[in-house]
Amino acid sequence: MAETMPSALVVVELLAAYHSLLLAVLVGLRRISIPLALMCAVFALHMLVNLGAGFGLMVGPLDVSDAFGLFYGPLFYLFVRGLVYAEGQPRWRDALHGLPGLAVAVFHLPVVAARTFGFVALVIYVLAAFRALRRHRSRSPQLRSDDLSVDLRWVHRSILVFAAVALFDIARSSARAVGQLAWAGDEMLALILIVVVGLLSTMAWRSTLHRQLHGEIEAADQTELANADKAADYQTLFAVIDQVVESRQLWREPRLSLNDVAEACGLHARDVSGAINGVARVSFSDYINAARVDAFDRLLGDPNQRQRALLELAFEVGFNSKSAFNRIYSKLRGRTPTAALRELRSADEAPVSRPES
């Protein structure tokens, strides 16, 4: 009897299970994100259960495939919470989020009820994740000068991609149910699984970088710093802060934080934040980056410095990435650094007009 080759879907599910399980081990052992490690492990188990069901091994009480959808929402929210808050790592009580999924697996609720409940729960958890992300985006510029390096907009994009994949899979399942298999066959499901594995890998990579940069908000930083003591003389405080920042060139530190400036000035972080917000009318990040741009322009104004690479000058004044430097400089000056250099060189080469005798 001739041996039958496994289908493309079977191969992809096996590879997805293997890759996701490997991700779970790596992320878990490095303690990058326990929720992400669990999410990868759950997805790997999901693939194995699907394989078992396809081969007729998962029947009756063993067929728990509908329960997996109830785990992804809570795990994704806990993953985001850990990215946003330094104290956001999972605790034992967070295991309660998994009870609905366990209930569906044990009691085998009807498919429609399980999927409806899973969809509603997923929407709630995603909204909670968006709320945490919005909090991080509003607080981070008030606490550190390199807020762009720990920006979490990639998580927003991940959510949108996951949503697009989910909607496409729903459309594929619906088309398959009515017999339109031209684009709704196993090949399309295999493609969806490849995209999901790619997203999990990207999330593992980006969350590793986020951890290395300590991009989480500390517990002491979660209060609104702008609501500091209104009786403080912010004008006087800002003069002190501005003098210390300029005289000691604190802006040259790429990862300069609000606490660093407060310590250098001998002030409380809330007073520093209140003075910058109240007098300069900008966030801490904008204030420091404006000082960096001013320092860059001073270097660029020196003819002896113009032979150096622009990025070298940018790094010297405290920027830590080309994209952040170009974005901030263009925002503050209305032109790119290259355009600014070109204008200076044109001015140097222009003939000097002399008054008529």
Image (cartoon, rainbow, N blue to C red):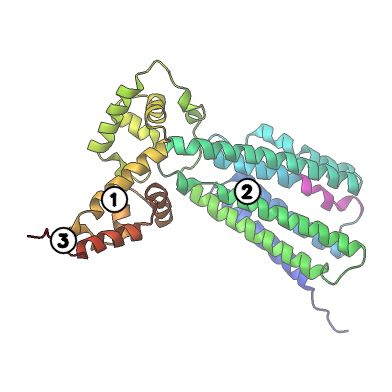
Query: Label 2 neighbourhood size at 10 Å, few (<14), some (14-19), many (20+)?
Result: many
Marks 1 and 3, how far apart at CA: 29 Å
The residue lying at 48 percent from left, 42 percent from top is 215
Picture coordinates of residue 138, whole percent (x, y): 52, 37
Picture coordinates of residue 119, whole percent (x, y): 79, 45
Q: Can residue 68 be found in the magenta stretch? A: yes
Marks 3 and 2, how far apart at CA: 67 Å
Residue with the most extreme bottom position: 2
Magenta segment range?
60-70
Check disc 2 and report its element: helix, strand or loop. helix
Residue with the most extreme front position: 357
In the drawing, what numbered circle is on residue 36?
A: 2
- Amino acid type at image mark 3: Ser
Q: Mark 3 = which residue?
A: 353
Picture coordinates of residue 297, whole percent (x, y): 28, 50
Q: Can residue 32 be found in the magenta stretch? A: no
- Amino acid type at image mark 1: Phe
Quadrant of image for the C terminus: bottom left
The answer to whether residue 288 shows anywhere in this view is yes
Image side of residue 60 versus residue 250, left or right? right
Which is nearer the eye, 81 or 148? 148
Which is nearer the eye, 347 or 49? 347
- Amino acid type at image mark 2: Leu
Q: Which mark is in front, 3 or 2?
A: 3
Quarter-of-image position of residue 58: bottom right
In the rendered image, the vertical position of residue 85 relative to residue 67, given as above or below: above
